[in-house]
Amino acid sequence: MVPSTQYRSTNIIIQTILEGILRAFKDKRNPRNGIIKSHLIKYSALKTSTAEKYFDKMEEAGYISSHKEPWGERVRIIYEITPKGRERYEWFVRINTELGG
């Protein structure tokens, strides 16, 4: 799936966010099990404020988790997918395929 800046349903946006985390997890060059917040926002093709709303709701629902890690003088937020998030990703893929999304 290639993120688009055209209108996307909530299901497609959630699927894209979960997919972004899974892709980072599968990347052998990635030393962590998650993805940096700014990279996930870029992958999802969302405005920061919109992405943060989705991230918060998805974290509340138990699809993703986040933690902070130091990066020089700054702190980065890392998002990881939970077992429930992996299950839901498969569910969103099936639903969106059936609906032609």
Image (cartoon, rainbow, N blue to C red):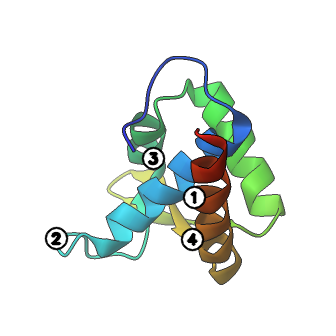
> At label 4, which amino acid type do we have?
Ile
* Residue at the disc numbered 3: 40
Earlier along the polypeptide chain: callout 1 or callout 3? Answer: 3
With 38 as the anchor, is 65 left or right in this view? right
Number of residue marks: 4
CA gap, disc 2 and disc 1 = 26 Å
Q: Is residue 65 visible?
A: no
- Secondary structure found at label 3: helix
> At label 3, which amino acid type do we have?
Leu
CA gap, disc 1 and disc 4 = 15 Å
- Secondary structure found at label 1: helix
**What residue is rendered at 38% in x and 51% in y?**
73
Q: Which mark is residue 93?
A: 1
Q: Which mark is residue 25?
A: none
Vertical side of 73 occupied by 81: above or below: below
CA gap, disc 3 and disc 4 = 12 Å
Mark 1 vs mark 3: give the one in front. Answer: 1
Quadrant (top left, top right, bottom left, bottom right) of the N terminus:
top left
Assess whether mark 3 and mark 1 are in contact (beta carbons under 8 angstroms). no
Q: Which mark is residue 81?
A: 4
Q: Quadrant of residue 23?
A: bottom left
Earlier along the polypeptide chain: callout 2 or callout 3? Answer: 2
* Residue at the disc numbered 2: 29
With 99 as the anchor, is 42 left or right in this view? left
- Secondary structure found at label 4: strand
